[in-house]
Amino acid sequence: MNKILFISALLISFLSGCQKNYEFTWKEGDILFQDGDCGDFCEAIRKVTNGYDGRDFSHIGLLILENGDWYVIEAISKGVSKTPLFEFLDRHTDEAGQPRVVVGRVIDEYKYLIPTAINVASTLIGKPYDSAFDLNNDAYYCSELIHMSFQKANLGTPIFEIQPMTFKDPDTGETFGIWEKYFQDLGMEIPEGELGLNPGGMSLDPAIRIVHEF
């Protein structure tokens, strides 16, 4: 091997080693499940929900392609937002620098809904975050955003299972203190038993199959 080829090979090897393993064939409509760190809130969410392969998920977003760039439509504290994919992936990483994200896709039966669901989700950008976790208002939390986008695409029929919500510690049967203060500050009753969704439960939903883990 001559000197130029040798240096080129070393450079390629070096660059490859520095790149994060984001190589994956993304598809519009991919559903990204994120294991984030939001303190006591995330711990409370994790404790009452099971996720795919025993994973703990506290957030979820919908992947879209716009002008050749990937974005994630997500409901976060500032409201429904469009976030660059790399920013979403870098938000929470493990010790090796890999995203704490699992990628799901709706099953073949519902693939035809994806373009309309994306259009619906896009029209909701700018809507407020649903602090009350109420499926009947005009605000959205992360799981609700995905659920409602596909439900509207499916002419009002949900494709994801809706379950009674709980804000109680399964070990004690008592409401988590963090939730008591949260709803007290909002001036509302805790919506214990009201219907809703969460990222962990959605990762196990029959309408979704997991296709990639970082």
Image (tube, grey):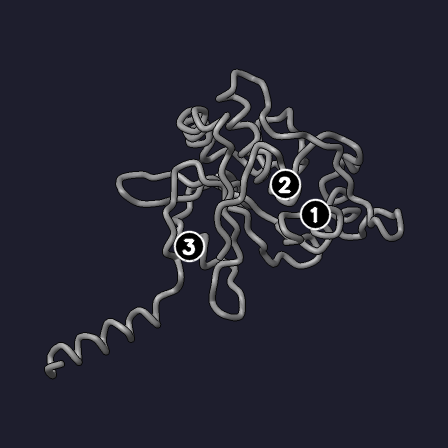
Amino acid, disc 1:
Asn
Q: Quadrant of residue 36?
A: bottom right
Amino acid, disc 2:
Leu
**Residue visible at 56% across and 17% down in the picture:** 156
Query: Alpha-carbon distance for marks 3 and 1?
Result: 26 Å
Query: Alpha-carbon distance for marks 2 and 3?
Result: 25 Å
In the rendered view, would you say 130 is above or below 113?
below
Which of the two residues, 155 or 210, is positioned nearer the viewer here? 210
**Residue visible at 52% across and 21% down in the picture:** 152
Q: Which residue is mark 3?
A: 87
Q: Earlier in the sequence, mark 3 or mark 1?
A: 1
**Residue visible at 58% across and 19% down in the picture:** 157
Q: Which mark is residue 197?
A: none
| Number of marks | 3
Q: Which mark is residue 50?
A: 1
**Residue visible at 62% across and 36% down in the picture:** 205
